[in-house]
Amino acid sequence: MEMDQMIIAVREALDDMKARDIVEIDVTNKSTVTDRMVIASGTSKRHVMSIGQHVQEEMKRQGVMPLGIEGVDTGEWVLVDLGDLVVHVMMPDARSFYDLEKLWGFDGVTESETV
């Protein structure tokens, strides 16, 4: 699956589960681990866990086998590793504390917003 299609599928899965504050960050020139990140928030630990599991299941359904999922046991921060795309679903407090947007130099504009 092409990256643009994968991002659309992930965003739809996040929207299905009513994830909040969804941002996409291009880290192609900043990371050797992945090319893109999508970060979203949930309203409770159970919500965060459910969102992460839904993203994993939806991507499998579309033929993309996740390399792994971490954090479903705690629900503070769930990471779904799709290889070239990593999805982070976090509780607002964890998201604020780790501030991945600042860490990766997010400028507040996603590619999908500029099209």
Image (cartoon, helix red, strand yellow):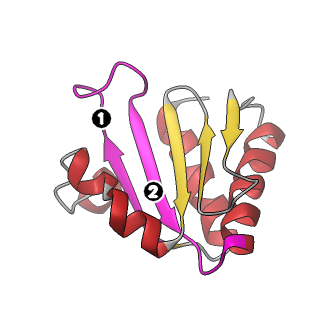
Give the extent of the magenta segment: 21-45
Name the spot of residue 46 as percent of width and height, x first: 75, 72
Q: Quadrant of residue 63?
A: top right
Q: Secondary structure at mark 2?
A: strand
- The reply, left or right, for residue 57 in relation to residue 67 is right
Q: Check the image and report above or below for 16 versus 63.
A: below
The amino acid beneath tag 1 is Val
Q: Quadrant of the C terminus?
A: bottom left
Q: Check the image and report above or below for 85 versus 96.
A: above
Q: Secondary structure at mark 1?
A: loop
Name the spot of residue 11 as percent of width and height, x first: 56, 58
Magenta run includes residue 6: no
- The reply, left or right, for residue 45 in relation to residue 86 is right
**Residue under the point 38% across and 52% down:** 24
Q: Which label was assigned to residue 39?
A: 2
**Which residue in the structure is indicated by mark 1?**
27
- The reply, left or right, for residue 90 in relation to residue 1 is left
**Residue under the point 41% across and 64% down:** 95
Name the spot of residue 103 as percent of width and height, x first: 24, 47
